[in-house]
Amino acid sequence: MKYKGTDYEMWDTWYLNVDDQIHGFHLKMQPDNRWNIGHVYTDDLLHFHACEDLLPPLFDDSNPADYYGKYTGCAITNRQTGEHVIYYTMREKDTFHQRIGICTSWDLEQFQEDSRCVLTPDPAVLIGYENIEKFDWNIVDCRDMLVVYDPDSMRYYGYFAAAADVGRESPVGVIAVAESTDLIHWVRQSIAYVPTVNGVVEVPDVFYLDGKWYLTVLSGADYCGRGATGDSYVSCCTVYATAMTPRGPFQEPENSLLIGGTTDSGYSCRSVLFRGKRYLLYIDRSAGGSAISLPKELKVIDGRLCACYTPLLEALRIRPLPVPEEVFGWCVEPNSFAWRTRGGQLHAQVGGFSISTVNGSYQAFRNPQCAKSLEVIAELAVSACAAGIMLYALDTQDSIAERYALLIEPEQQRLFLASGYAFRYVAARQFPFEKGRAYSIRMIAQEGQIEVYIDDVLLLQCALQTAQGLSFGLVCDRGHCEFRSIRAFELEP
């Protein structure tokens, strides 16, 4: 169901709303390592349809400043003329120095490339073409343009990834801002955001929500942002900052993490307004290749920007999966790779079940119902060391290729995803769980990817093996857990 390239690798994607039809433009790497910009559209943020590519990469010397591959940008409609403007990152043939270029379209079917560069870094503020030799820096950064319109000032603001000397050990990546009235001529460059820690940031997104301007950026350990978040399990992340005006300066709150995980988690976040709400989309790195993620609604909850479950996803449900109402309807799973050992009992109670285990052991119970893609919702009150949802990747209905335990661990203050009987680490996120308190957990497993929401806020997402089919179960580890309001659905494959 998710949109992914069948013969190419998909990367950064940006969006344009035209009468609530959402057009997406994305980087695509061909098998021969050529880069291009692809084009898709969707009417529901769930099902994407491929269009012709925008522009081919150039392999001649007709424009040495725009050679080989075209990179990340944005799209916006000129409010005065109705013409659509697509920005992209140019790279020089020999040095890979960067500029911002454009192409235009009236109908999003025919695109006209404009050979002009519309923006380069101002050396009075940033590392640019005129002053790069003064710094220990390898390229002129000027990429990933994002343009928004501010109705208060009646101006367009363009944000782009750049580099600057801000008085640290070395220059760092920053997000710069310029302004324009015609989308072609950009003036008044300044630094809108400097990361809290040393590093490089890119793929900015900027939007207005609940009385503030928000900026999100991609960062992480391999961006020299080892301390970009307070979560020790996160090495690749999107963080956010806020400002009262579109020019900034944008400041990170104490907990600035929006989404995060490893390189197998989502990255390159961009958002789009759709039917009056703002939705976040990013690129999944899944077992089946990179794909456009399921949408998340952006909300401000208790002062924090959160990526939340959206009821739009209910349209993916094919049918409800039966959940056994009696203990005997669940399959007792051995808790050893070779012997039929078991370490606990399942008990029926009003509205659900409970599991109690003996000291030092765990026990899982599997629902025999199978599906190609799966959504499971339950309410958990964990008094054990750990408890949660089991996910079984199936070769056939009776053959388990891999098993995963998705565990709430109050004592460890984390959500932990493990595989196999040995509970091998797959992914984790820190979270202030309280022992005995009830939490709603929602798990979506689809096409080599898992998403986990706690109280409908996205907490964990990563790639895993979903094999030929899926089933789910309940698990408790060294203690007692109550499971209530258990529901499950088969989703579109």
Image (cartoon, helix red, strand yellow):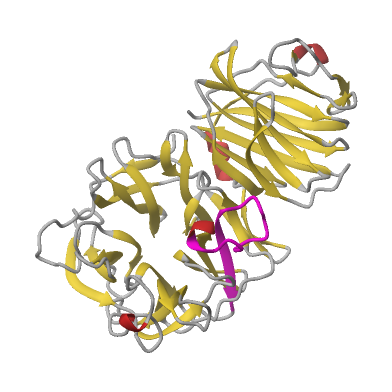
Q: Nearer the viewer, residue 352 or 57?
A: 57
What residue is shown at x 28% (from left), y 82% (from top)?
Answer: 185
Placement of 330 over or under 439, stated as above or below:
above
Q: Which quadrant would the N terminus be assigned to in this image?
A: top left
What residue is shown at x 79% (from left), y 19% (from top)?
Answer: 325
Residue 252 quadrant: bottom right
Residue 476 in percent (x, y) is at 80, 29
Residue 101 part of the magenta segment? no
One can see residue 159 in this view: no
Q: Nearer the viewer, residue 211 or 64?
A: 64
Residue 227 part of the magenta segment? yes
Q: Which contiguous range is marked in magenta? A: 223-243
Locate residue 324 relative to residue 17 in the image: left or right. right
What residue is shown at x 59% (from left), y 47% (from top)?
Answer: 310
Q: Nearer the viewer, residue 233 or 214?
A: 233
Q: Nearer the viewer, residue 106 or 483?
A: 483
What residue is shown at x 36% (from left), y 52% (from top)?
Answer: 24
Placement of 434 over or under 347, stated as above or below:
below
Placement of 128 over or under 103, stated as above or below:
below
Residue 276 in percent (x, y) is at 53, 59
Residue 94 in percent (x, y) is at 20, 65
One can see residue 473 in this view: yes
Locate residue 108 relative to residue 425 in the image: left or right. left
